[in-house]
Structure formats: C-alpha cells, structure tokens
Image (cartoon, grey):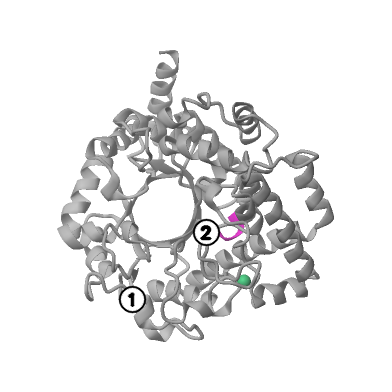
C-alpha cells in the first residue's frame, strides 16, 4: 500500500507538466489490410492513447505479418522502387510481398495516421529472413564448414556487400518514397560464440556446427584486422565438441567452466571472431542510420534489441547501449516481462548443458539474478508468473543510465499477450509494467509485440498506466 501511495505521488508530480510520451504499438500488415487503417487506429487511440504506429512493413515471417498460410512469401508490403536497389542480387520480385496483391500498406496508412495526429514508423524485421529463394544463397552466411546454415538463428551475412546494399537501399526507398516519421530495425541474431553455446532462449536446440559467419567476406575482413581465420575456425570446432559433449551429458574431466575457459585460452581467436561480428553489426546499424539521415535528417532511427539482452550476460556485454547511442535516436530494449519467465528458464537449461553445467539450476538462477541485476520468483514458479514489473523498472533504468548525456531516447518494449505456454498477461500486469517503465524515466513505451496478439482489455491496461502517470 505504501508503494501504491508512492506511485500515486509520482504520477501526480509527473502529471504536472510532464512532456507527452511516445506511445507506440507494433502492428502487423494484415489488420490494416483487412479492416482498413481507420478502424484500427481509432481502436488503439481509444484504448491506449497510441500516437505512433510501428508498422511491420518488411518481414518474411507469416505470423509477423498477421497471416498464416503455407505459401506465404512476405517481404516488402509497400511498393518497391527499383532505382534504390543497386549492387544486390535480390530482385524486386524477391523483395516485394505479394500476399495481398499489390496492396501498399504505407500508402494506405500514412494519410489516415496523419489525420489523427499519429506518426508512422517502418518496423523492419530482419530475423528469419526468408532463405533459399531467388539469389539469396549469394548473400547468406556460411557456417564453420562453409555450408549455408539451415537452422535458427541464421540469415544474410552483415558483411556481404550485396546484403548491405539491399538494406541501405530499402531504407532509402522508405525515406524518399513515403512521408514516414521514422524507422526501427530489428535483428534477433548474435555472433558465433553465443550461438555455439546456445546462450539464448530455445538455444538448447541450436547446432554448434552451424554457427556463423565464416563466409569469404568475413574471412577477408578478419584478415585485414589481423585475425587468423583458420585458428578461429579451429577454436569454434573445439567449442562445438565441448557443446555437443555437454548436450550428450558427458561432464568434462575438469568440469564445464574450466574446460570452457581453457578453450578460450587456447583459442583467443574465438573472442576476436565474436567481436568481429558484433562490431560488424554496429557498422550495419551505422550504415542504416547514415543513409536515412542523409536523405531526411528529421526521421527518427533506432533499434529493437533482442530479448536475449535480459538473459545472456554474453549478449548483454556485446549490446553496449553507450556504444550504440552513437548512431541511435532511440533504443527499444525488449523488456517483455510476462513471457520472460519461460524464456529465462529455457536460457538456463541451455547454458546449463555447457558453460554453467557445473551449477545446479536453482543456484544458477541466483547467480544469474546477481549478474543481470534482477530479483524474481524461484525457478519452479518463473514460467507461471513471469518476471515482475520491477524487472522492467531496473532494465529501463539501466538503459537510461547507459545512454545518459546522449540524444538517445529509451522506449522499452512492453509485453502485452506475447504468447508463452503458461504465464498470462492481465490488465494489471500490463499496467504495472507500463508504469514501471515510465517511473524509471523512459521517454516512451512501445506496446509489443503485435497488435493482433493483444486482448483489448490488456491493451487498456497500458492506457490506464499512461493516464495515471499523466503521460498523455
Ligand atoms: Zn560473413
């Protein structure tokens, strides 16, 4: 009750002259196409005071577009203007989504949004880039053995010029062809180290032999930086053996952690190769940022940061917000608290088969809580109750501290009915998470992860928090 009184006080103080917050929502193409933008926009304005649409205008994943069909093509749901796509093997036919004929979702959305005083951002979802069509083999990553990885997480290589040119061309196309207000790019991938260890939720099913990238572009880039490509490959092969043995239940003679560390000592090229990937992803962000800004400096450009930032300390170390702030108008850390319980357990089960295999899982959670700065339910209850609003508060605060003194805003992603086997969103869980992000000082919130997933009563929970806080 004391906490509730404190919250009310904070809301009152904030309500007096608090600046309006960015209130965004991630939106699939299908409801806009099926129901028309007007009805959907009225709905989200009324329920949750949404003022910015993050429209999933480019995706190769059917559910992200809001449709389910076996012959889904996906791609760009707006018009493709071929003059912006130079020096890429992808053709306009590869890029253009034809699942709704020649329907142009941006052309439909932007005037309706403007009439209501709302902004439109292009939400470009790179993960699960559709493999094996057209000439995608030319831009794809290569694994440890030079193969095209078939398993998640995979995608085009960020050091492949044909892919880089495609992405920057796509951004320029959006910026020049439409009266958009911003762009959000999202990648849910990591380098070979985290992929090999399966250091992410659902990572226990990863294949440590299919980690990337070891293509000729990465090899050349590594050589220019003085990294021994062969030694890097051998190091990752040693890691592959270690991970496979752990998955098979064979404990190394000197224990899991010691053996892991010994491999790193033997092959420092493992870390060098990992940082090559991470720096390349930062360069990829910078290339997107610079291209958009060179066309229309007023557009807001930022990044969706994969949920793995909440689970894997390895991934968190690489996603350095202070570093990213150099080319970010905003950062959206995924802080989906409700589904995070299940995902956390999944992460622990995966790394519990190798690098942290010496530690019982309940103790692993204690260790994890310390190093990731959370304080949550015990392991056996986590999948049912998820993580708390306190997690949203702490991680929002951490992100804000990391970018303090820069222009970069923090717009946390708020969990509204993100599907997970056991925990369920409620109006109260959404209200508490939204309020926690606002109390921590976020300049906005991004209601996630997709409109069609959200129950109206739970979306309303976000609206209530925004009203309570005086943010709208
Ligand atoms: Zn590569």
Crowding near the residue tagged with mark 1, few <14, some 14–19, many ≥20 C-alpha atoms within 10 Å? some
Q: Which residues are magenta?
A: 324-328
Q: Name the one closer to the observer, 301 or 206.
A: 206
Q: Which residue is mark 1?
A: 96
The residue lying at 66 percent from left, 66 percent from top is: 144
Q: Nearer the viewer, mark 2 or mark 1?
A: 2
Residue 445, label in figure: none
Q: Which residue is mark 2?
A: 153
Q: Pinpoint residue 467: horizontal percent, then vertical percent.
A: 31, 33
Q: Pinpoint residue 185: horizontal percent, then vertical percent.
A: 46, 61
Q: Quadrant of ligand 1?
A: bottom right
- Indicate the quadrant containing the N terminus: top left, top right, bottom left or bottom right: top left
Q: Name the one closer to the observer, 96 or 298.
A: 96
Q: Name the one closer to the observer, 383 or 151.
A: 151
Q: Secondary structure at mark 1?
A: loop
| The residue positioned farthest toward the right in the image shown | 266
The residue lying at 46 percent from left, 29 percent from top is: 388
Q: Secondary structure at mark 2?
A: loop
Q: Pinpoint residue 278: horizontal percent, then vertical percent.
A: 64, 60
Answer whether residue 308 is magenta in the image. Answer: no
The residue lying at 44 percent from left, 13 percent from top is: 2
Drawn side of residue 154 relative to residue 17, left or right: right
The answer to which of marks 2 and 1 sits earlier in the sequence is 1
Instruction: Tell me if residue 424 comes above or below residue 170 in the rendering.
Output: above
Drawn side of residue 302 relative to residue 21, left or right: right
């Amino acid at each position: 009750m004391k906490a509730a009184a404190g919250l009310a006080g904070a809301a009152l103080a904030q309500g007096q002259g608090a600046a309006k917050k960015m209130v965004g929502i991630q939106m699939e193409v299908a409801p806009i196409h099926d129901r028309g933008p007007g009805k959907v926009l009225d709905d989200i304005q009324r329920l949750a005071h949404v003022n910015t649409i993050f429209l999933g205008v480019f995706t190769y994943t059917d559910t992200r577009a809001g449709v389910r069909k076996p012959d889904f093509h996906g791609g760009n749901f707006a018009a493709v203007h071929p003059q912006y796509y130079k020096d890429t093997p992808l053709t306009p036919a590869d890029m253009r989504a034809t699942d709704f004929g020649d329907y142009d979702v941006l052309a439909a959305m932007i005037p309706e949004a403007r009439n209501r005083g709302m902004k439109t951002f292009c939400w470009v979802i790179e993960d699960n880039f559709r493999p094996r069509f057209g000439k995608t083999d030319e831009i794809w990553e290569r694994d440890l053995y030079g193969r095209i990885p078939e398993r998640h997480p995979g995608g085009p290589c960020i050091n492949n010029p044909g892919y880089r040119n495609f992405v920057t061309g796509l951004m320029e196309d959006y910026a020049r062809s439409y009266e958009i207000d911003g762009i959000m790019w999202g990648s849910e991938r990591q380098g070979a180290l985290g992929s090999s260890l399966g250091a992410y939720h659902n990572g226990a099913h990863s294949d440590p032999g299919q980690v990337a990238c070891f293509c000729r572009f990465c090899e050349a880039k590594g050589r220019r930086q003085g990294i021994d490509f062969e030694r890097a490959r051998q190091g990752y092969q040693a890691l592959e053996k270690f991970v496979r043995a752990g998955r098979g239940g064979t404990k190394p003679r000197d224990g899991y952690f010691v053996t892991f560390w010994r491999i790193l000592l033997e092959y420092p090229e493992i870390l060098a190769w990992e940082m090559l990937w991470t720096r390349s992803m930062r360069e990829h962000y910078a290339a997107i940022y610079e291209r958009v800004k060179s066309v229309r400096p007023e557009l807001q450009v930022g990044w969706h940061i994969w949920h793995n930032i909440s689970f894997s300390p390895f991934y968190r170390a690489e996603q350095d917000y202070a570093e990213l702030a150099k080319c970010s108008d905003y950062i959206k850390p995924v802080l989906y608290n409700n589904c995070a319980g299940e995902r956390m357990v999944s992460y622990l089960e995966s790394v519990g088969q190798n690098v942290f295999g010496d530690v019982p899982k309940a103790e692993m959670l204690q260790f994890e809580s310390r190093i990731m700065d959370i304080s949550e339910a015990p392991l056996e209850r986590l999948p049912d109750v998820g993580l708390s609003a306190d997690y949203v508060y702490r991680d929002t605060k951490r992100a804000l501290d990391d970018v303090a003194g820069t222009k970069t805003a923090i717009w946390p992603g708020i969990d509204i009915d993100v599907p997970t086997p056991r925990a369920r969103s409620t109006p109260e869980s959404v209200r508490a998470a939204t309020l926690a992000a606002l109390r921590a000082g976020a300049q906005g919130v991004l209601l996630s992860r997709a409109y069609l997933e959200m129950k109206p009563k739970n979306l309303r929970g976000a609206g209530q928090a925004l009203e309570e806080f005086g943010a709208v």
